[in-house]
Amino acid sequence: MQKTLLSLLLAGTLFGASNYKYEISPMIGYNIAEGNLNIKDDGYFTGGLEFQFNTLKNTISPEFSLFHSRGVDYKTGSDTQITRGAFNGVYTLEKTATFIPFVKMGLGIENISDETTSNQTGMFLDAGVGAKIPFAKNWAIKLEATYLAKIGSAHNKYSDNNLMTLVGVTYSFATQKTVTQKTAPKIVEVVEEKEEVVVIEEPKTDSDHDGIFDEQDKCPNTPAGTKVDANGCKIFLDDDKDGVENSLDKCPNTPAGSAVNIDGCPQTINLNINFENNSYTVKDASLPKIEKFANFLKKYKNYMAEIVGYTDNRGSATYNKNLSQKRANAVKELLVKKGVEASRLTAIGMGELNPVASNDTAEGRAQNRRIEANLILN
């Protein structure tokens, strides 16, 4: 008999516990009053809030409720406001397929704003039944009927009675771990069998020999010797910022902003060879520049060069054109002496055309007395 009773109590604990720590329920309903309270139509609407605290260890959950009714009419024509606060213990019964029944009991106080001899402020006992009908996670419709008996009555020796019928919505929150029935722990002897596992790794390959294994290589056919990034893709290096990669740039030191061809070389090169006024003699200071240009042409034989001579604007145009032609011829001859085939060179005199500086100053005129070269791909 004792074991049966213990099993029933344990089952009650399991079914009565909620998986949520808190429940809050806004409620609205109708209060049916006993006739001797002198309330018009023996009833009025009420609304309020119920807050319930659940624990997995206890079968009865404490509940605090607060209800208020305003504009409650007396039969005499006057009206009042009624506020009730109560503390109840709620016992949740076993859940059915569609709803969760519960019963409650507790103690409260009722405040009457406009008291009469038949309706006065005082304490009450209450008891109720109800059910919660879940319709979504954490949400349920709540139905409740609560009977209230005022402890003290001013006009007779019996308690005055009220019956509140309520409907509302319950929101449950703060999930707590579910309590399960404890059973004696089972002792299981575990025998471990040690098994030696030999892992044979397949050798990693690097088909294009760029230092990145094939399984990580996103550019698997990179030419040998090419610098690559972590994905095995070619790194584009352009030190002189001319848009031609270093490995393809035949003129690696092109000034920034210069227009270049596919080899990264300027189409027009200012050789910085300047002449004295009315002279086509190449200065000794310009010879290293001519030698450097000759070495470039000897290395890259797919280029031809057009040597272009210029003058300042002093003198006649015809004279200046002839003088610029002599300057271009002088540089061409020096390039030939440095080993450049004459067939790859052309000399043109442009006279005073295309000045690069003002001819109004001695410095500007000196800059205009110059030699340029146009590179032409074969």
Image: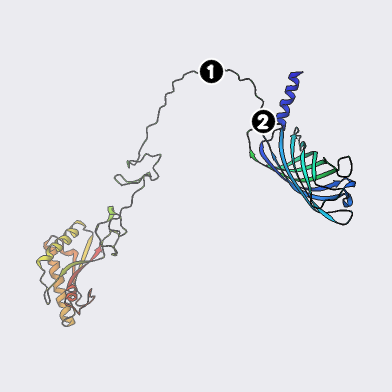
- Is residue 63 shown above or below 286? above
Indicate which disc residue 275 carries.
none
Please name the residue shown 83% across and 55% down the image: 79
Quick one: label 2, few (<14), some, or many (20+) residues within 10 Å?
Answer: few
Provide the secondary structure element on which disc 1 rests: loop
Is 172 or 322 nearer to us in this picture? 172
Q: Residue 198 placed where, x, y %?
A: 42, 24
Identify the residue position indicated by label 1 in the image. 190
Quick one: label 1, few (<14), some, or many (20+) residues within 10 Å?
Answer: few
Circle 1: residue type: Val
Which scheme is used to colour this image of the protein? rainbow
In the picture, measured across the screen, residue 207 lies left or right of residue 113, that is left
Q: Residue 76 placed where, x, y %?
A: 89, 55
Number of numbered tags placed on the structure image:
2
Please name the residue shown 13% across and 63% down the image: 336
Please name the residue shown 69% across and 33% down the image: 17
Please name the residue shown 10% across and 68% down the image: 283
In the picture, measured across the screen, residue 89 lies left or right of residue 343, that is right
Quarter of the image where one finds residue 157? top right
Identify the residue position indicated by label 2 in the image. 57
